[in-house]
Image (tube, grey):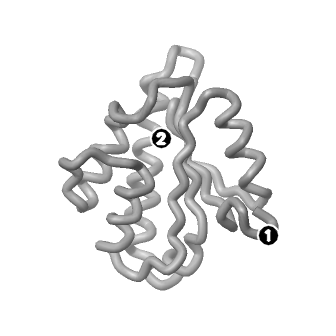
Amino acid sequence: MTLGAGPLGPALAAAEEAGWTTLRLDLDGVGSKAELLRRCGDALRVPEWFGGNWDALADVLTDLSWLPDGPGRLVAVTSWHDYAQARPGEWATLCEILEQAVDFWRGQGDGEGAAPLTVVLADRPAGRPGG
């Protein structure tokens, strides 16, 4: 997982140009765990069986079979600062789940350390000034 302060738009465009699936998880206005998990489900385009809890989120992040095949997947998490500050325990859990998923996919690579899942924590959503 990476923390980026630079513009998000060029990173998303480069990933898409390289054939990666890009997913945007905007946490603007999220105020509860239930709302966070709903937003995760929507952003990840999860299947109907998604249970809307931490275990289900971890499960879908280590599956991703419903997403298009390609060289990789990039999840850009934006507008996360307020949620992280207001609900630090839940934020820590989300970060742990994301890190475990990135590590899982890194272990599935082609022997060259390729990671088909990358998560970027961005300061601003794409399309907003500076992002």
Q: Nearer the viewer, residue 10 or 95?
A: 10
Element carrying mark 1 = loop
Q: In which quarter of the image is residue 101?
A: top left
Q: In which quarter of the image is the C terminus?
A: bottom right
Q: In this view, does 44 lie to the left or right of 20?
A: left
Element carrying mark 2 = helix
> Pointer 1: what residue?
129
> Pointer 2: what residue?
102
Q: Residues within 10 Å of mark 2 (few under 14, many from 20)?
A: many
Q: Which residue occupies 32% across, 35% down?
A: 63
Q: Quadrant of residue 127?
A: bottom right
Which label lies toward us, 1 or 2?
1
Q: Which residue occupies 79% across, 69% down?
A: 129
Q: In the rendered structure, which amino acid carries the disc numbered 1?
A: Pro
Q: Up-down: is 123 above or below 59?
A: below
Q: In this view, does 101 lie to the left or right of 46?
A: right
Give the distance between the C-alpha atoms of the residues marked 1 and 2, in whole angstroms.
29 Å
Q: In this view, does 40 lie to the left or right of 125?
A: left
Q: In the rendered structure, which amino acid carries the disc numbered 2?
A: Val
Q: Which residue occupies 32% across, 47% down?
A: 46
Which of marks 2 and 1 precedes in the sequence?
Answer: 2
Furthest residue toward top: 111
Q: Position of residue 22 (x, y in %)?
A: 56, 43
Q: Residues within 10 Å of mark 1 (few under 14, many from 20)?
A: few
Q: Position of residue 2 (x, y in %)?
A: 63, 51
Instruction: Mark 1 and mark 2 in contact? Answer it, CB < 8 Å.
Output: no
Q: Up-down: is 89 above or below 99?
A: below
